[in-house]
């Protein structure tokens, strides 16, 4: 399904929600319950997960893995946006792409959406083939969470600012070789992706790592994307998404998760809110500063 | 008023190498990132400087960032691929 918008079409239909485990008394029923193991994680609100509308921006290596984890976790309303098409070099790290997709030059977004529905029959996945920059702020308002799986800084800044303006949580993932990071941006007073950027980001903004886009400026990636790092980054992104939709913002990552697979180190790095960041207008900043002030007084 | 000059070390997270830099308190984090990346012939890409667990803001001066003499900062790549 291409190019339709949230608030219309099949997303408004009531999706089947399986009964809770305690409503069943059939011996051995837990073995038939697809989500039994998820239910055992006490804080996951599966009903909220089933209902949530999530937007995945980017259907490359990270987008594939994120979509897989979302579908298996029980998310049933997934929209995937990507402008690109599948090529052979994608196949060593993209679960939902096949050799046939590469030969046919299939759309990445459509291939992921098809794969998600194969993996999870209760999930309705929608593909939008196009550039995220063409979608307005109102588009983001149709979702509960936005996950950024992008391959360039310009698109990442765009998605971040639009999600922030629409007051939607934005979970951003990035990777390079064995290094990866995840940042969760919670408007209206949390720091955002742009708060952590500097002139080195500006120099390469707009240049893509993609090997398939046309009419774009490239710069050589320092290291190629690598599937084991992708798996870790995507898993953290979807776990944070589960916390957000389950209403457990108290458990959500407040800093940046930084992973270095070469040294086998993961840690949290603090990215302070930048008062000069355009995503934090003065009235919002006032609230944020008040929080900081009151915190330090206490 | 003369800006204070001090020395600190920057570590290359990817190789473990360190370099000593002599700076004014009015130098910016952006300038440090560029100098260190140039010194190590880093590939084009996004980098950040961290002090301990905190990522330093690019446009801020060393004075505003709370950087002090003898600090050891680390230059790390900011992964931007997907």
Image (cartoon, coloured by chain):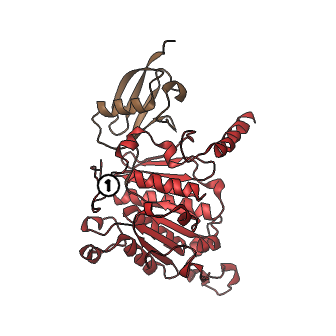
Q: Quick one: which chain is red?
A: A
- In terms of depth relative to the viewer, which is nearer, A148 or A99? A148
Look at the image and tell me in which quarter the N terminus of chain A lies.
bottom left
Element at label 1: loop
Q: Residue A195: x and y, percent?
A: 52, 43
Q: Quick one: which chain is brown?
A: B
Q: Residues within 10 Å of mark 1 (few under 14, many from 20)?
A: many
Against A62, residue A178 (above or below) is above
Rendered residue at 28%/53% (across/down): A217
Rendered residue at 51%/62% (across/down): A136
Q: Residue furthest top?
A: B1
Quarter assignment of residue A35? bottom right
Against A205, residue A142 (above or below) is below
Look at the image and tell me in which quarter the C terminus of chain A lies.
top right
Rendered residue at 32%/37% (across/down): B15
Q: Residue A174: x and y, percent?
A: 42, 53
Rendered residue at 52%/53% (across/down): A161
Q: Residue A103: x and y, percent?
A: 24, 75
Lateral position of residue A179 relative to residue A23, left or right: left
Lateral position of residue A270 relative to residue A226, left or right: right
Against A26, residue A146 (above or below) is above
Against A83, residue A170 (above or below) is above
Q: Which residue is mark 1?
A: A209
Q: Residue A228: x and y, percent?
A: 37, 59
What is the chain identity of the residue bearing mark 1? Answer: A
């Amino acid at each position: 399904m291409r190019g339709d918008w949230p608030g219309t079409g099949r997303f408004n239909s009531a999706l089947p929600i399986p009964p809770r485990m305690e409503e069943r008394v059939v011996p051995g029923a837990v073995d038939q319950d697809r989500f039994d193991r998820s239910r055992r994680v006490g804080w996951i609100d599966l009903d909220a997960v089933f209902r949530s509308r999530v937007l995945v921006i980017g259907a490359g290596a990270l987008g594939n893995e994120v979509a897989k984890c979302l579908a298996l976790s029980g998310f049933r309303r997934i929209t995937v946006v990507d402008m690109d098409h599948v090529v052979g070099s994608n196949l060593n790290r993209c679960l939902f792409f096949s050799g046939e997709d590469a030969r046919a030059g299939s759309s990445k977004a459509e291939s992921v959406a098809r794969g998600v529905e194969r993996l999870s029959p209760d999930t309705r996945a929608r593909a939008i083939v196009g550039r995220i920059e063409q979608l307005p702020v109102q588009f983001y308002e149709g979702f509960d969470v936005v996950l950024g799986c992008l391959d360039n800084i310009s698109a990442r800044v765009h998605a971040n600012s639009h999600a922030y303006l629409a007051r939607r949580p934005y979970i951003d993932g990035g990777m390079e070789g064995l290094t990866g990071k995840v940042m969760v941006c919670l408007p209206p007073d949390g720091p955002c992706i742009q708060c952590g950027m500097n002139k080195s980001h500006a120099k390469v903004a707009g240049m893509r790592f993609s090997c398939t886009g046309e009419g774009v400026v490239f710069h050589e990636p320092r290291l190629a994307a690598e599937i084991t790092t992708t798996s870790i980054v995507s898993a953290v992104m979807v776990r944070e998404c589960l916390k957000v939709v389950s209403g457990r913002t108290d458990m959500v990552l407040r800093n940046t998760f930084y992973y270095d697979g070469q040294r086998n180190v993961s840690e949290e790095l603090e990215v302070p809110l930048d008062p000069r960041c355009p995503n934090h207008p003065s009235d919002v900043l006032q609230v944020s500063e008040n929080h900081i002030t009151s915190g330090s007084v206490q | 008023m003369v800006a204070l000059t001090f020395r600190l070390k920057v570590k290359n997270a990817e190789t473990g190498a360190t370099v000593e830099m002599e700076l004014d308190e009015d130098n910016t984090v952006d300038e440090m990132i560029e100098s260190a990346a140039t010194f190590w012939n880093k590939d084009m890409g996004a980098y950040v400087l961290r002090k301990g667990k905190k990522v330093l803001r690019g446009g801020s001066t060393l004075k505003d960032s709370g950087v002090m003499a003898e600090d050891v900062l680390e230059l790390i790549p900011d992964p931007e691929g997907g």
